[in-house]
Amino acid sequence: MILPIVAYGAPVLRKVSKPIDASYPDFKKLLDDMWETMYSSNGVGLAAPQINKDIRLFVVDSEQIFENMDEEEKTAYTDGPGIKKVFINAKVISTDGEDWAYNEGCLSIPKIREDIMRAERVTIQYCNEDFVEFTETFAGITARVILHEYDHIEGKLFIDYLKPLRKKMLQSKLNDISKGKIKVDYKMSFAK
């Protein structure tokens, strides 16, 4: 089932999410709904707070990014062909490498894209969909998507990395999003 994406301004997007375990109700259905919601809105990642659930869960599919790149673009990133993974109760252990800029957007903040600086690599501890624990290091575009989604379960948004003046210049657009004064081609819910 395609779920509505929570728009900027909803309190759930600013909460630190709670851990879950295998007894979480209807977990398999929730995961299926998250994948379906992400793909139907053309996302490459989706965190539970974006569907109004304050739990430490997100999904990432960076494979799509590489599938849509031309051969020359692919050589710029070392993490091809990308990943398709579930991250439960994730905890960033470390980030390293050089910070680099990339034009990011967010399904909860439609029609706003900004160059955001993030670390080249992330080492993260997480459980997969079977609640098996892993610690892995990811690089490049995949690391960026993971860090973006991880921020969601920490109550942060990509616009928090902007300089105050730039954020102030976007404020009227952000206000419009929070009031539902925006047209998108996917389901959204707005804090009234």
Image: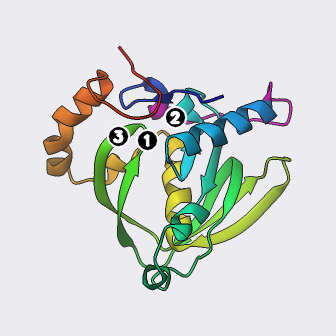
User: What residue appears at the point 52 percent right and 27 percent down from the top-left corner?
Assistant: 4
Q: Earlier in the sequence, mark 3 or mark 2?
A: 2
The residue segment tinted magenta is 13-26
Q: Which residue is mark 1?
A: 107
The residue nearer to you, when weighing 80 against 153, is 80
User: What residue appears at the point 50 percent right and 41 percent down from the top-left corner?
Assistant: 41
Residue 99, magenta (yes or no): no
- Picture quadrant of residue 54: top right
Given the image, on which type of amino acid does mark 2 rest? Gln
Given the image, on which type of amino acid does mark 3 rest? Pro
Q: Quick one: SS at disc 1? A: loop
Q: Which residue is mark 3?
A: 110
Q: Are marks 3 and 2 in contact (CB under 8 Å)?
A: no
**Where, quadrant-wise, is the C terminus in this rendering?**
top left
**Where, quadrant-wise, is the N terminus in this rendering?**
top right
Above or below: residue 182 compared with residue 192: below
Distance, label 1 to label 2, CA atoms, is 8 Å
The residue nearer to you, when weighing 89 against 8, is 8
Q: How many residues crowd around disc 2 within 10 Å: few (fewer than 14), some, or many (20 or more)?
A: many
Q: Which residue is mark 2?
A: 50
Residue 154 appearing in the image: no
Residue 24, magenta (yes or no): yes
Q: Quick one: SS at disc 3? A: strand
Distance, label 1 to label 3, CA atoms, is 5 Å
